[in-house]
Amino acid sequence: MLELDRVSKRYPQGQTALQAVSLELTPRSMHFLTGHSGAGKSTLLKLATAIERPSGGRIRVGGDDITRIPRRRIPFLRRTIGTVFQDHKLLFDRTVYENVALALQVCNFPRAKIHGRVQAVLGRVGLDGHRHKYPITLSGGEQQRVAIARALVNKPDLLLADEPTGNVDKELADELMDLFHEFQQFGMTVLVATHDLTQPQRLGLPQIQLHRGQVAS
């Protein structure tokens, strides 16, 4: 589902974020991407969604080589990928429902089907009763669930999450990780970047450890 073949990323200032990283996530699997701050976790996720381009190597998503994907094709690529950002990236002048529905509207999803799809995904993440609220009125954990719902509403094949539990307590972190694990069991491929090593141990799932831009284990 996601394959990196000797991928490197060097920035113009001379910083090397990733160096010859190779990994493969098979369909319907869940992995944790671990490592210290600055190890290259966020960079790897940005490369997988074509937010940034690699300096070397090849990246495949669903069998398609996206290494030099034309800009016009990037929106179509992202329809197959759900992304949960560390800072949520919610629109605070729109309701929970509107934030999630926007992910379908920008893809020209049929209006008649948007309501049912949004209602279903909000129920799945435990926010069914919050659809008319604004994000500013929600707790940090609830805002994170809105971000997860927005990432899921398109029914992506691949779900990427960047430190999704970085600003929540342990109990909520466990709930969110259990939710990601549930998505994987329903057939989604999931990659979660985290510095919390207790989660892969608790769930008994594999981790890919980065150290200074390289795969350490």
Image (tube, helix red, strand yellow):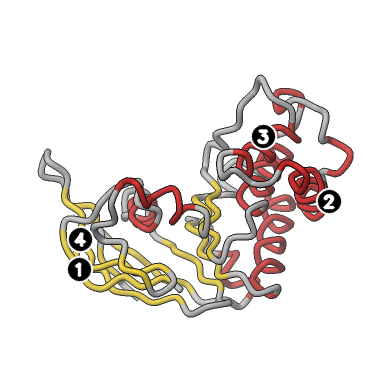
Looking at the rendering, in which quadrant would you find the C terminus?
bottom left
Farthest top residue in view: 93
| Secondary structure under the numbered disc 2 in the rendered image | helix
> Please, is residue 165 above or below residue 197 in the view?
above
Name which of mark 3 and mark 4 comes first in the sequence: 4
Would you say 123 lies left or right of 32 here?
right
Residue pointed to by mark 4 = 8
Q: Amino acid at mark 2?
A: Gly
Question: What residue is rendered at 68% in x and 37% in y?
Answer: 143
How far apart are labels 3 and 2 at the CA level?
A: 15 Å
For marks 2 and 1, the one nearer the N-term is 1
Looking at the picture, how far across and down is residue 155, in whole percent? Answer: 64, 59
Q: Nearer the viewer, residue 104 or 197?
A: 104
Which residue is labeled 3 in the image?
A: 99
Residue of label 1: 20
Nearer mark to the viewer, of 2 and 4: 2
Under mark 4, the amino acid is Ser
Quick check: 114 left or right of 197? right
Judged left or right of residue 107, residue 121 is: right
Is residue 183 shown above or below 26? above
| CB atoms of marks 2 and 4 within 8 Å | no
Q: Amino acid at mark 1?
A: Ala
In the foreground, 122 or 71: 71
Q: Amino acid at mark 3?
A: Asn
The disc label shown at residue 123, or none: 2
User: Residue shown at 43%/62% (left/top)?
Assistant: 34
Tag 4 secondary structure: strand
**Badge 1 vs badge 4, beta-carbon distance below 8 Å:** yes
